[in-house]
Amino acid sequence: MKQATFTFHTGLEVFLGTGSTVQDVVCSFQGRQSVKHLVESLGVPHVEVKRIEVNQIQVGFEYLVRGGDLVQVYPYKPEDFLGDQDLPKRFILDTHLGQLAAYLRMLGVDTEYRNDYEDAALADTASRDGRILLTRDLRLLMRSIIEHGYWLRSKLPREQLREVVTRYNLYTEVVPFSRCMHCNGSLEAVSKEQVLDRLEPLTKRYYFEFHRCPDCDQIYWKGSHYEQMRHFIDEFMLGKDSPSPYSDG
């Protein structure tokens, strides 16, 4: 039986179930084991790991761990995603995250969501479309096909929204009410005359600005529900300088 010491740095301790910000774990193993396999066997998804150093030398996930190795595992930080042109800021959400999907679409963030996705389909779509997978299912994030993903620390949708927007630096990319809440399509402005035959009498009388989703044909206008959402967004943006209690670091 061989042993290696893994040091998990601040931001990864949440996966180890300890209160310490830096945690050393002695890992026993047999045979030829990749550092990716051993890191995930200890509970940390590979998509949460930015860098690994073995004996002070940076290595890839494919590195085969040897007995006596000292392994340093570092997490991603929000600043790592600032200005990262190689990381598309579009997401796919697990089936239990419908409210978070609605919030992200409200802010204008490209968000794929269906409540009937199987895990395999989620992983395949994330990989094929280059989307960041958001979930609270650690095993789903450990699928090798997943390149970009994040385990939501909170179970509460509003706190989850703060986590995602903070982690991926989305504040400057927020364009409220630019996406369809139903299907994620990009909304287009239309004249009242174009949708007049589909409006209720009071809507015809009191509203003059309309948008339509070209994908699902849903119509939007600034009714009472809009004002509630506008208030929510204003409050959310006012709190953008407050650190998320669930953000890394």
Image (tube, rainbow, N blue to C red):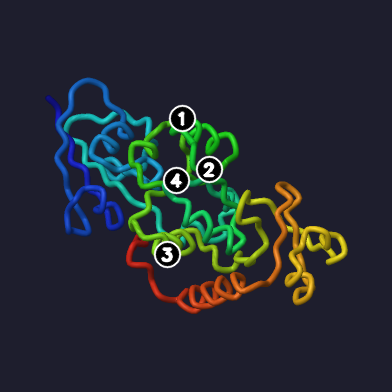
**Lower sequence index among marks 2 and 1:** 2
The numbered mark, 1 or 3, whose residue comes first in the sequence reads: 1
Query: Which kind of residue does numbered mark 1 sit on?
Result: Ala
On screen, residue 5 versus residue 90, left or right, reads: left
Circle 2: is it few (<14), some (14-19), or many (20+) Cα within 10 Å? some
Mark 3–mark 4 distance (CA, rounded to whole Å): 19 Å
Q: Residue furthest top?
A: 31
Residue beneath label 3, please? 158
Indicate the secondary structure of the residue bearing disc 2.
loop
* Residue behind mark 4: 149
Q: Quadrant of the C terminus?
A: bottom left
Residue 215: numbered disc: none
Q: Secondary structure at mark 1?
A: helix
Q: Is residue 229 left or right of residue 139?
A: right
**How many angstroms separate mark 4 from mark 2 (CA)?**
17 Å
Residue placed most toward the observer, 232 or 149: 232
Q: Earlier in the sequence, mark 4 or mark 2?
A: 2
In x, y percent, where is residue 206? 75, 77
In primary-sequence order, the first of circles 2 and 3 is: 2
Answer with mark 3 or mark 4, whichever residue precedes in sequence: 4
Residue under circle 2? Answer: 114
In this view, the mark in front (3 or 4) = 3
Q: How far is the residue under mark 1 from the one under mark 3?
A: 27 Å
Three-letter amino acid code at the position of disc 2:
Arg
Front of the two marks 2 and 3: 2
What is the x, y in percent for residue 120? 46, 30
